Image (cartoon, grey):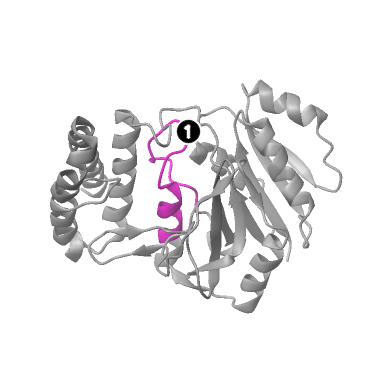
């Protein structure tokens, strides 16, 4: 099988260098490497002009629009491999990453996607832990991630994580990443829309903790600053999640989803119970998150109704 690796990058040349060096060390060589670079990203263009690609079959795709969705769709148009793997510029795949990805796709022709663990580094510390449940969509609409903490044997999941996911080109067909995902950079939950669409089409999504990358969360250059609350980024996150869930949950479960979303929710998309839980530690921020969650949910509902009316 021919392997394409697709990396969207923006203004993080030091992180990108680490990623490219890791790809040079793969036990299964990369057949095509696509870097998607913003036209205004002078830092990355200057880095690439000096970088010694050695055996990497590197090609660049220029994108003028902001956001990871536009970047991935631009890169997707250039993919020629039988399998294409996506990782972030602030990640470093383990040496056997592509070898293990290939083994899964060769083992079962019904596998459409493969993902694995991202070992998250914070300075000298690595976030450690063990979670047996990874990438599952529950009946009420709650999504369990835990891709960075997954342990155990390879198994079927519903959702893969953007920093470490691969797809069979045959399975993709004409599918594109959803341009309705809000945000000017990370566009959180874009991968959920993509993988749930493939899952609904009958393709298996496999999570294998041994298909691993080291992840060094780097600075973002948009409204989403990871650990600092930003109202716009927060509303975008909830909007994206809600829109995807409304489109992929059976209509018979929409009432249950809305009851759970408004009354319970999660730490990222608050309902009343989560607001009460966070109130002692976050105070007014918890209240802003609750209002932002409800706004994001409502905006997604309006968009869903308009599209389906």
Q: Which residues are magenta?
A: 175-196
- Relative to the observer, which residue lies in front, 270 or 29? 270
Is residue 277 visible in the rendered image? The answer is yes
Residue 29 location (% of width, % of height)? 79, 58
Nearest the eye: 254 or 154: 154
Camera sees residue 79? no
> How many numbered marks does the figure carry?
1
- Residue 178 highlighted magenta (yes or no): yes
**Badge 1 density bin: few <14, some 14–19, many ≥20, Cα 10 Å:** some
Instruction: Name the residue at 80% across, 47% down.
Output: 57
- Left or right: residue 241 versus residue 53 is left
Residue in the image at 40% along x and 60% along y: 196
Instruction: Give the prevailing secondary structure in the magenta stretch.
Output: loop
Residue at mark 1 = 185
Please state the horizontal and vertical placement of residue 82, each as a whole percent of the image.
67, 62
Q: Quadrant of the N terminus?
A: bottom right
Image vertical order of residue 133 relative to residue 269, above or below: below
């Amino acid at each position: 099988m021919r392997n394409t690796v697709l990396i969207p990058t923006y203004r993080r040349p030091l992180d990108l260098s680490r990623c490219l060096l890791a790809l040079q060390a793969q036990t299964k060589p990369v057949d095509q490497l696509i870097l998607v670079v913003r036209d205004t990203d002078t830092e990355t263009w200057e880095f690439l002009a000096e970088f010694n690609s050695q055996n990497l079959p590197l090609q660049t795709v220029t994108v003028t629009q902001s956001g990871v969705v536009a970047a991935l769709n631009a890169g997707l148009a250039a993919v020629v491999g039988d399998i294409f793997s996506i990782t972030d510029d602030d990640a470093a795949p383990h040496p056997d990453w592509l070898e293990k990805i290939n083994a899964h796709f060769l083992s079962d022709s019904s596998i459409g996607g493969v993902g694995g663990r991202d070992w998250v580094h914070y300075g000298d510390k690595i976030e450690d832990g063990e979670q047996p449940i990874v990438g599952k969509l529950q009946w009420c609409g709650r999504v369990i991630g835990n891709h960075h903490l997954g342990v155990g044997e390879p198994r079927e999941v519903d959702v893969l994580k953007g920093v470490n996911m691969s797809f069979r080109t045959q399975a993709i067909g004409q599918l594109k990443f959803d341009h309705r995902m809000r945000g000017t950079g990370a566009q959180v939950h874009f991968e959920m829309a993509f993988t749930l669409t493939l899952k609904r089409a009958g393709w298996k999504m496999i999570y294998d903790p041994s298909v691993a990358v080291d992840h060094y969360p780097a600075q973002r250059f948009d409204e989403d600053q990871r650990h600092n609350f930003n109202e716009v980024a927060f509303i975008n996150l909830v909007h994206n999640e809600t829109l995807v869930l409304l489109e992929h949950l059976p209509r018979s479960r929409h009432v249950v989803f809305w009851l759970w979303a408004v009354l319970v929710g999660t730490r990222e998309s608050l309902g009343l119970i989560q607001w009460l839980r966070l109130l002692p530690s976050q105070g007014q921020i918890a209240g802003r998150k609750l209002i932002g969650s409800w706004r994001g949910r409502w905006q997604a509902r309006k968009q869903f109704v308009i599209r389906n009316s």
